Amino acid sequence: MVSGVSQAQGYIARTLNHPFPGGVAVLDLGVLSQPPTVQYRSHPVMVLKDSDARYIAVVGIGLDVKPGQQTVDAVLPEGRKAIAFNVGAREYKSQHITLKNKKHVSPDPEQLARFEREYNAQMAAYAQFRPDTPSNILLDAPVQGRLSSPFGLRRFFNGEERNPHSGLDFAVPTGTPVKAPADGVVTIVDDYFFNGKTIFIDHGQGLVTMYCHLSAQNVTVGQQVKRGQVIGKVGATGRATGPHLHWNVSLNNQRVDPALFMAKK
């Protein structure tokens, strides 16, 4: 086993290396004769050349990962290696939300069955790995507006704890155009019980973004979209207390903090 403490000084390594639960680890793979492959938690990992020409692994770290040592499995030209990296601690705040629709807190069996079908479809979309390199790693915000709920909040709906907040919420008016933050392929356009009107975009190499609670969807499954293209409009569909955009970023099937990827203007 070798250490994956990044020795690279490329732009992506300097910008994205935030190894904590819900964050990203950028691991130095060295100057190699051919692209390596890397897996983490049984999922393929994004591998790129950074601006210093070294190969790097860009690893998404799930919120459920405990601080301490983690490893990726890398296949390099000289053979297979387990590369270790350290995950630091990060504290997330709590949020208490009151919902008028009690079924969005305690769904009945029929609604639970619907949710399970929808959940499985979303998990399949998050797990996809197209070999195409993303058009850009630093992402544009899909809307411009106030952030109302940050990533990682421990959420309580009508006093009952639910999963942590896995994205960013933008408090913007109904009808606000939502733009693609990078080129990609649309993999989901649907209307879900909790998420409301939802869009998924696959940007390549395990980078997937999700947009929900929309009032309108302007794209279709399989459509290729370009960075800055309007894909839908903000709404308050599904489990929402008012108009806002919920935006998820997933990397190697781990939901990570979108704020880490937002391009600074």
Image (tube, rainbow, N blue to C red):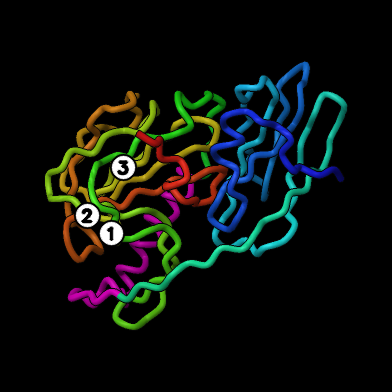
Which residues make up the magenta segment? Answer: 97-126
Q: Mark 1 points at which residue?
A: 148
In the picture provided, is 45 more to the left or to the right than 135? right
| Magenta residues, dominant SS class | helix
Badge 1 local density, few (<14 within 10 Å), some, or many (20+)? few
Q: Mark 3 points at which residue?
A: 199
Dot 1 falls on a residue whose secondary structure is: strand
Q: Name the residue under label 2.
A: 171
The image shows residue 183, relative to residue 263, as above or below, that is above
Residue projecting furthest to the top: 33
Q: Which of 93 and 248 is in front in this view?
A: 93
Which comes sooner in the sequence, label 2 or label 3? 2
Q: Which of marks 1 and 3 is in front?
A: 1
Quadrant in the rendering for residue 3: top right
Badge 3 local density, few (<14 within 10 Å), some, or many (20+)? many
Q: Nearer the viewer, residue 50 or 158?
A: 50
Three-letter amino acid code at the position of disc 3: Ile
The image shows residue 104, relative to residue 41, as above or below, that is below
Dot 3 falls on a residue whose secondary structure is: strand
In the picture provided, is 209 more to the left or to the right than 44? left
Three-letter amino acid code at the position of disc 1: Ser
Q: Where residue 198 sits in the image (x, y, percent)?
A: 29, 47
Q: In which quarter of the image is the N terminus?
A: top right
Q: Where residue 53 sits in the image (x, y, percent)?
A: 67, 20
Three-letter amino acid code at the position of disc 2: Ala
The image shows residue 122, relative to residue 116, as above or below, that is above
Dot 2 falls on a residue whose secondary structure is: strand
